[in-house]
């Protein structure tokens, strides 16, 4: 699929380009308060949206994959107990896999 | 241990005399630890990328060139959800803008000159930035940046290749991997919620996404979340901002 190839390449080069801009642009540009504030708010907004689509988006309509939801919930509980990133991740996939076997 | 055994008690002179700095071993251990977890996430990324329809080479190319985990997971996540590759590109790059801003603290520590910027830039990600700025002086900071960068990069790419090959051979959907990406996003989001305004933005972004899912083409709800961040970010803040050391 041609367009997928193009986007894989553009995503890869674009990601590097953003990093290169960061170490090359004059500091005054990146230190602008509103620019910085937007930059700090983009990741939480994007991550929240990605979590939401991961949980309830079934190709453009609402659909919940219960083992996935339970797995992420188990990961969230692990996080409440200050588990490391790896532990959260393992708890989530193990919980999801076990439920997929049962259901 | 270092061969230099006569550190002054407070070690104040280490950077002046050019002696090895005492944090080196601890930094190396931390860098290897970060690399190992990156390897595990690399395996996951490789497997999910294959399940989303990428080839082994495409998955590996992303890890080698893009080298920024959250954006890569976002890209394959949007593709897997039926979104257009263009929507995947937009989501990945919007998420990747934070790496641009990491350039400011990193250049203060690493101080790349001229062409050095070309390869220094490649290693500017969450973990290397955090490790570089956490050190007491720029010597240790530079070492932390490179040790973390090289350890993470090598294990992330090797992990990606392994995951992609595993994913090509067996159906990984049965191994609970569908929960991996949202769980990783949640674990990344969690510590960011303490930032000024971040929790509100995250909730509004999640609600906007939820409403738009059945109304717009896949991928668009995620881009709408970026609009929420831009609108709030560009609005002047009433509370005085506490600037980090510049």
Image (spheres, coloured by chain):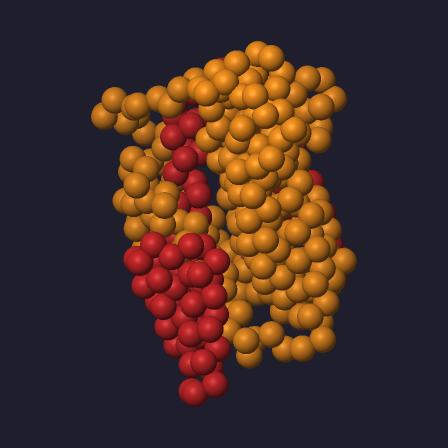
Q: Quadrant of the C terminus of chain B?
A: top left
Please tell me which residue is depicted at 62% across the width and 24% down the height of the picture.
Answer: B4
Residue B14 point in image, percent of width and height: 55, 18
- The image quarter containing residue A102 is bottom left
On the rendered image, what quadrant is the N terminus of chain B found in?
A: top right
On screen, residue B186 above or below B147: below
Q: Can residue A95 be seen in this snapshot?
A: yes
Counting from the top left corner in percent of width and height, residue B82 is at 56, 65
Indicate the position of residue B124 as horizontal and vertical percent values: 59, 34
* Vertical arrangement, residue B178 with respect to residue B39, above or below: below
Q: Is residue B43 left or right of residue A61?
A: right
Q: Residue furthest bottom?
A: A102
> What residue lies at 36% left-to-right and 68% top-to-bottom?
A74
Who is closer to the viewer here, B88 or A44? A44
Residue visible at 32% across and 37% down? Answer: B195
Is residue B50 left or right of B33 when viewed as pictured? right
State the residue in front, B3 or B50. B3
Q: Residue B163 location in percent, x, y? A: 66, 64
Tell which chain the image draws in red. Answer: A
Chain letter corresponding to the colour orange: B
In the displayed orientation, state which residue is furthest to the top: B16
- Using the image, determine if residue A66 lies above or below residue B205: below
Residue lying farthest to the front in this orientation: B6
Evaluate whether residue A14 shows in this view.
Answer: no
Residue at coordinates 39% horizontally, 38% vertically from top-left? A41
């Amino acid at each position: 699929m041609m367009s997928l190839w193009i986007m894989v390449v553009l995503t890869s080069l674009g990601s590097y380009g953003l990093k290169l801009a960061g170490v090359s642009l004059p500091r005054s540009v990146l230190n602008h308060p509103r620019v910085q504030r937007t930059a700090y708010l983009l990741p939480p907004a994007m991550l929240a949206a990605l979590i939401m689509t991961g949980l309830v988006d079934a190709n453009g309509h609402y659909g919940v994959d219960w083992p996935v939801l339970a797995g992420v919930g188990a990961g969230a509980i692990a996080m409440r107990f200050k588990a490391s990133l790896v532990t959260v991740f393992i708890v989530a996939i193990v919980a999801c896999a076990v439920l997929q076997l049962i259901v | 241990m270092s061969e230099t055994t006569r550190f002054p008690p407070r070690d104040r002179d280490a950077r002046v005399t050019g002696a090895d700095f005492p944090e080196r071993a601890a930094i190396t251990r931390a860098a290897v630890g970060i690399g190992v977890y990156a390897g595990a996430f690399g395996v996951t990324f490789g497997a999910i990328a294959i399940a989303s329809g990428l080839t082994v080479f495409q998955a590996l190319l992303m890890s080698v060139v893009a080298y920024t985990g959250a954006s890569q997971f976002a890209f394959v996540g949007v593709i897997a959800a039926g979104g257009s590759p263009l929507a995947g590109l937009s989501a990945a790059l919007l998420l990747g803008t934070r790496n641009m801003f990491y350039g400011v603290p990193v250049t203060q520590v690493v101080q790349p000159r001229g062409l050095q910027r070309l390869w220094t830039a490649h290693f500017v990600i969450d973990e290397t930035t955090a490790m570089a700025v956490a050190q007491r002086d720029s010597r240790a900071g530079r070492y932390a940046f490179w040790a973390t960068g090289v350890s993470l990069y090598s294990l992330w790419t090797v992990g990606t290749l392994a995951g992609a090959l595993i994913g090509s051979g067996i159906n990984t959907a049965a191994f609970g991997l569908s929960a991996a990406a949202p769980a990783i996003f949640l674990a990344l989001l969690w510590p960011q919620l303490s930032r000024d305004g971040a929790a509100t933005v995250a909730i509004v972004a999640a609600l906007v996404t939820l409403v738009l899912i059945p109304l717009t083409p896949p991928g668009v709800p995620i881009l709408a979340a970026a609009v929420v961040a831009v609108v709030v970010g560009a609005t002047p803040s009433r509370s005085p901002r506490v600037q980090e050391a510049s």
